[in-house]
Image (cartoon, rainbow, N blue to C red):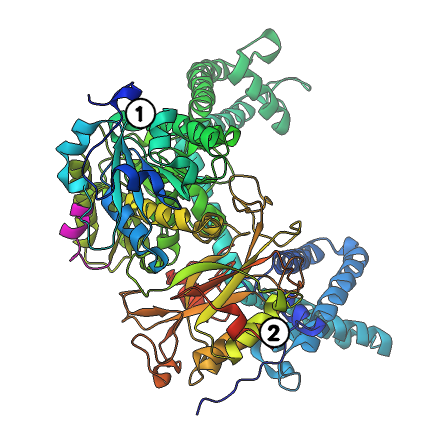
Amino acid sequence: MAGYGAASALTDAGDGNLAGAELERLSGHVVILNCSAQVPLLAESLWRARGESLAVVLVVQDLALWRAHPEWHPVLEAGQRFAVVVGRPTDAACLERAGISRARAAIILADPEQGELADARSTLIAVAIEQRNPQVHTVIELLSSINRSHLSATAVDDVVCVGDIGEKLIAQTCVTPGVGRLFEQLLGVARGGPRIHVARLPPALAGASFRELSRRAISAAAPFVLIGFLSSAAAGDGVAGDDRGGEHAVWRTARRRSVVLNPRPRVEPGRETPLGEDDLLVAIADEPPQLERWLQP
Amino acid sequence: MVQQVDVSPLRLTWRERLCEIMEPYRGGAGSTRLSLIVDLGVLLCIAVSIALIPIEVACPQWEPLIWRIELGFTAVFAVEYLLRWYAAPNRLLYPFTVYALIDLLAILPSLLMLGSQALVLRSVRALRLLRLVRLLRVLRLLRFVRYGFLIGRGLLELRIWLSAHIYQYRLRQLGRVLLYMVAVWIIGSNLLFVTEHQLDAPGGPFSEYWPSYWNMLFVLISGLDDSKEPLSLLGRIEVTLLLVAGMCLVGVLTGEIVSVIVRAVQRAGRVALKPPGERLEQHILILGCNAHLDGIVRQLHGSLRGRYYVVVVCPDAEQLPATDHAVYRKVFALAGDPGDSRTLEQADVDTAFRVIVLASAEGETDVRAVDSRSLMRTLAVICRGRAIPIVTELLSEESRLDAAGLPGVEFVLSRSFAEKLMAQFAVNRDASAIYDQLMTLSGHSSELYTVAVPRSLVGRSFGDAQRHLLEREVESVVPIGIDRSPPGAPSTRFWINPVAGTGALSPAELVLRDGDRLICIAFERPSFGAVSEEDLWRGTVLLPR
């Protein structure tokens, strides 16, 4: 097993197109920890995200495993930046080499070598990252939803639980056949497709309600559909419940905003609630929505 | 030129709310819990008032009391009739509708009698006529027609509940033993009364008819003592035979009761077993079992509020845990190989309207082998020739590509969704809670639905539909796209965020057509998507409650 246990094993695998000083200067990139079959699609999605082609640094613990699976290697095109750092993902030196302190986000994949027990390793990696850079946005892949509660002690921002997703999608597709394809399009990597965008409310629009802003968007034939908002104010009745947190728990984002999707009339926060400057609008659009241009009265 | 729709706010008026409450409960967005309570109250009043008619005939001495109760019911039905009339969309025509005429017939006999008392129609002929009119209250039975859906569903659920409990706790055997016991008791009591009552002294055990029953019960359960001893030889022979029968039957009965108790303890916390003779229709069939089963059952319960039965077929069905009694109230387990056609028949696959095939490892570690098993089970359902929508969980992309040609099947590859979600979350810090809510089925979260475009919006633009639904106060729905998929292939041709001039849509194509479906974000299936009673019975659509 290559690279296990020692910082001295820290090397560039030489599989990417970034190395040396270029890697050290990198900032605003995404660090993927652990390699698996998901790496190529994930990297491709990140390169195509928002059209800004994020640089991707992959931290590989087991170089032999990585080398044994060429199908896990993303195919690089012009302008796409990718580096492979070999080392233990919980090791501070290894994380520093991957530029975790300057990274925009860290994605912790379930280690395929650990099988069903991968969640424990992933959690330890999350703790190590949060210690190095609490500002980084951490996304962790969990295999079992039972382990979700163990992450509450860490500062992990987003948890993607494969089991949860499967359950939810199967149930939704059962109730509304075809819904899986709708989600596939919303989550697709192809450029120009509809996505869910979250955009800060321009100060000029503060005080307007969701209903009012939607009316303006419809009248102006805006190239987006407003579907809700993220409120920094305390959530009240009518806000969605969460199956993880009891009947009337509130969905909150990593930045503790309450999610008001499809706002209801006559409840707070709802369709008529005046939105504040700190609130964010949620829209479905092909490109990041230009709110100021389309939502002016 | 696209016409503008009326966008006046649709706040529910008091009359509309009353109409919603007085409408018979059918489930779905338009039917509230209050409507169900009102229906059950009215049904109870009808049943009691009809039950009073034979009592009145059999016990004339209670006539004054029954008449007072009858007046109370008449008042209730009259108020109900007036409320329905007030709430009716067309008040001029309402009295001439079939249900209104039936309602009137239900109160008319009592009103006539009340009127006759006031007019002092006291001649003998008038009194006879009034008695005949009084019997016309039987016409109230017609009122049950209005509540046919509710009564039918209630009886069906009661039948399934009873047969499930009888099968679960082996109550059929206990019932049979009890029946034999009662038969022996009745025959024995009568035999000994006939044989002994001439010889027995007054106050003897079998000298009177009803005390014979009491004494025979003692003989059967606890044996014979001196006080119960018969006097004649024939009586003694009969008692001896009855004692033997009693010993056997009481022993078997005790054993059966213990068996029921043991079974109840063993099955506690487990999913109820599907009764073999009970035919289910419009249920959700889950083939295979894995760690996702509990989550899926909970999600379905959260969305459909326990309206539909769920049958889980897997080899170790007897051991399936029921983690929450309320969630698993309508879930049955059936042991067997989900790929076997005989097992599928037992699971009533032909009358199910949704089939979920779970990636069931069953000792297998290779993901392709697990997928192959799931695909075989999917094929087993497809080859039955019924157009049942199937959702199949797969573990590998290769399997999905191989099976892409299977008709009517949707494949869920959670791993692939996880990859896409992670990429989205990495670049969009707030997206996870939004997707989590969109993907979660519960009464408190918004999900994606596709519903038929209401007739009033056909010929209008997508923007008009957005504006119209934005101003609806009845329910909150955000349309986000148009679905023009052919029947039987949902969401195969659709546009999310349709914008004229971009993508494949011209301004003319943004005009909604008959047969189009709107892709919406809503808390539950929008009520404007018309659902007929036939749809409900056939299970074409899934509705909560």
Residue B404 counted in the magenta span = yes
Which residue was labeled with disc 1? A88
Amino acid carrying label 2: it is Ile
Residue B114 location in percent, x, y? Answer: 80, 72
Residue nearest the viewer, comparing B419 with B276: B419
| Chain containing mark 2 | B
- Seen from the viewer's position, the closer of residues B414 and B184 is B414
Where residue A205 appears, as percent x and y from the top left, is: 61, 68
Horizontal placement of A211 versus A96: left or right?
A: right
Q: Chain of mark 1?
A: A
Of the numbered discs in the image, which one, if any, rests on residue B102? Answer: 2
Side of B433 where A267 appears, left or right: right
**SS type, badge 2:** helix
- Given residues B374 and B201, the one toward you in this image is B374
Task: Say how many tags the image has.
Answer: 2
| Residue for point 17% across, 46% down | B399
| Horizontal side of residue A219 vs A235, given as left or right | left
Name the foreground residue: B255 vs B504: B504
Q: Quadrant of the C terminus of chain A?
A: bottom right
Q: Amino acid at mark 1?
A: Arg
Mark in the foreground, 1 or 2: 1
Residue at horizontal 15%, vertical 41%? A71
Report the Cα–Cα distance between label 1 and label 2.
80 Å
Q: Measured from the top left, where is residue A238 in percent x and y?
A: 62, 54
Q: Are marks 1 and 2 in contact (CB under 8 Å)?
A: no
Judge the density around disc 2: few (<14), some (14-19), many (≥20) Cα neighbours within 10 Å: many
Q: Which residues are magenta?
A: B397-408
Q: Image height check: is B377 above or below B16? A: above
